Amino acid sequence: MKQLIILSGKGGTGKTSVTAAFSHLAAQGQMANKVILADADVDAANLELVLQPRLLEQQDFKGGKVAVIDQESCSFCGECQAICRFDAINYIDGLYLIDPIACDGCASCVYQCPNTSISMHEQIAGNFYFSESRFGPLYHANLYPGQENSGKLVTLVKQRARLQALDENRELVIVDGPPGIGCPVISAVSGASLALIVAEPTVAGVHDMHRVLQTVKHFGVQAMVCINKADIYPAGANEIEAFCKESGIETVGRIPFDLTVASAMVAGEAVTVFNPQAPSSIAISAIWERIVPALLEKK
């Protein structure tokens, strides 16, 4: 069982559009009924908007802990407020109250309280979903704003996808990864067979592509690069290809700027479904045909 993860150094490069198209192409080709899909971008999951899945399972995801004051045993000494460096404890109407959003879960107030009136409670930090899409089973999740442990939620999404793939002898897990290089990306890259980096030919796009390539390399995962909106700034696209060639990284294709992609998003479709003959669809299909052999060759 192989894992293909699609990454980008920054948001908005077209990563999810490419992932959705790959999901469709995999369902039509030799891997039909052999693919599991996972959206590991739990902070801004949107693959479901294109795949239009049917929800089968939903679970609460418990992230970090938050402090809670037992008002009955509280002596209102104020030591908890004095020790809190996050200003999460407020004195309101004669009571000390904890702001769960401001609370960092450090538990300093728990140890400071002379009456043991404060305890740490798990909080629901998001939701985990399992759905059935037109192109295969989909695991996805939603982390609530301001919550922590997104890496842990990413791991849960990937583990469930991987276990079903192993149980059903499926060949491939396609993962829509998070942007950037933070903890969610590290969790998503773990165990991947191949990483496809979707890059933009802009100053910011090239800079962030370098960073995510370094991250993938650090974890020993083979990387390939495709350039989206390549014709908007050909010199930038050439710069990306030159860097990849010098670094021994294969550039598997260029995707032209194509308004069909936006129209497909509005329609809630993968661009390869919405218009298979669009320039972007043809380019993505060619990239997919180059990636599949590389995946099959890997042990």
Image: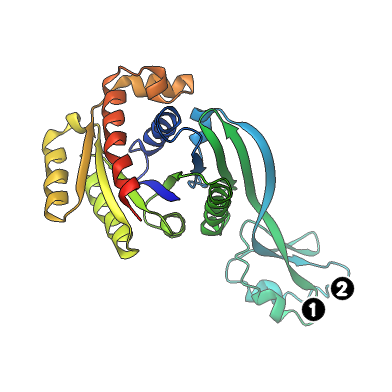
Q: Nearer the viewer, residue 267 or 195?
A: 195
Residue at 29% of width from left, 34% of height from top? 289
Residue at 36% of width from left, 24% of height from top? 261
Q: Nearer the viewer, residue 125 or 14?
A: 14
Q: Nearer the viewer, residue 65 or 221?
A: 221
In the picture provided, is 91 more to the left or to the right than 135?
Answer: right
Residue at 84% of width from left, 66% of height from top? 71
Alpha-carbon span between mark 2 and mark 1: 8 Å
In the picture provided, is 32 more to the left or to the right than 84?
Answer: left
Q: Which residue is mark 2?
A: 73
Q: Is residue 8 visible?
A: no
Residue 234 image position (x, y, % from top left): 13, 34
Q: Secondary structure at mark 2?
A: loop
Mark 1 Cα-neighbour bin, 10 Å: few <14, some 14–19, many ≥20? some
First in residue order: circle 2 vs circle 1: 2
Q: Which residue is mark 1?
A: 116
Q: Is residue 58 above or below residue 77?
A: above
Q: Callout 1, which amino acid? A: Thr
Q: Callout 2, which amino acid? A: Ser
- The answer to whether marks 2 and 1 mark residues whose Cβ atoms lie closer than 8 Å is yes
**Count of numbered tags:** 2
User: Image quarter for residue 149?
Assistant: bottom right
Residue 158 image position (x, y, % from top left): 52, 52
